Image: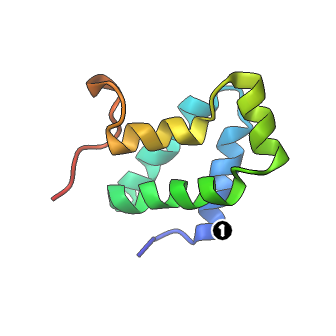
Amino acid sequence: MSVIPYEQNVELIEKALLSDHPNDALEKLVLALSKTGEPKKTIYELFLDYHLSVRETQAYLQIEKDKGEYPVELIMDRLSGWCSEGAILLPEED
């Protein structure tokens, strides 16, 4: 169960996405959520739920068009280990 309400987490994700360096801001958000005691799986699911809710919106499509990538997907890849070993976010949990 998430310590921080879902709506508040969504606001934090959206604020990070609007920053000048969204990848860095999202990484900091992941680390901050982890420090509050959120399990890696819960953090991943938060980003997945967010991704699924916005992936067909105009804002998502514009970010993807402008940057050629979507920062939320990159964070999900780093949380799941679908990246180079040095880019993995958070250790595996038992």
Q: Which quarter of the figure is the N terminus placed in?
A: bottom left
Residue 20, percent from left and from top: 71, 26
Amino acid beneath label 1: Glu
Q: Quadrant of residue 69?
A: top right
Identify the residue at image location x=63%, y=50%. Answer: 13
Observer-nearest of 53 and 10: 53
* Rendered image coloring scheme: rainbow
Identify the residue at image location x=59%, y=35%. Answer: 71
Residue 28, percent from left and from top: 49, 39
* Residue 38 visible in the snapshot: no
* Residue 69 visible in the snapshot: yes
Residue that lies at the very extreme toward the right in this rendered image: 58
Q: Quadrant of residue 5?
A: bottom right
Residue that lies at the very extreme toward the left in this rendered image: 94
Label 1, residues with CA under 10 Å away: few <14, some 14-19, many ≥20: few
- Could you tell whether 65 is left or right of 75 in the image? right
Number of marks: 1
Identify the residue at image location x=67%, y=60%. Answer: 53
Q: Is residue 28 above or below residue 12?
A: above
Identify the residue at image location x=15%, y=59%. Answer: 94
Residue that lies at the very extreme toward the front in this rendered image: 56
Residue underneath mark 1: 7
Residue 85, percent from left and from top: 26, 26
Observer-nearest of 35 and 77: 77
Q: Is residue 74 above or below residue 2?
A: above
Residue 31, percent from left and from top: 41, 44
Q: Secondary structure at mark 1?
A: helix
- Could you tell whether 90 is left or right of 28 in the image? left
- Could you tell whether 14 is left or right of 23 in the image? right
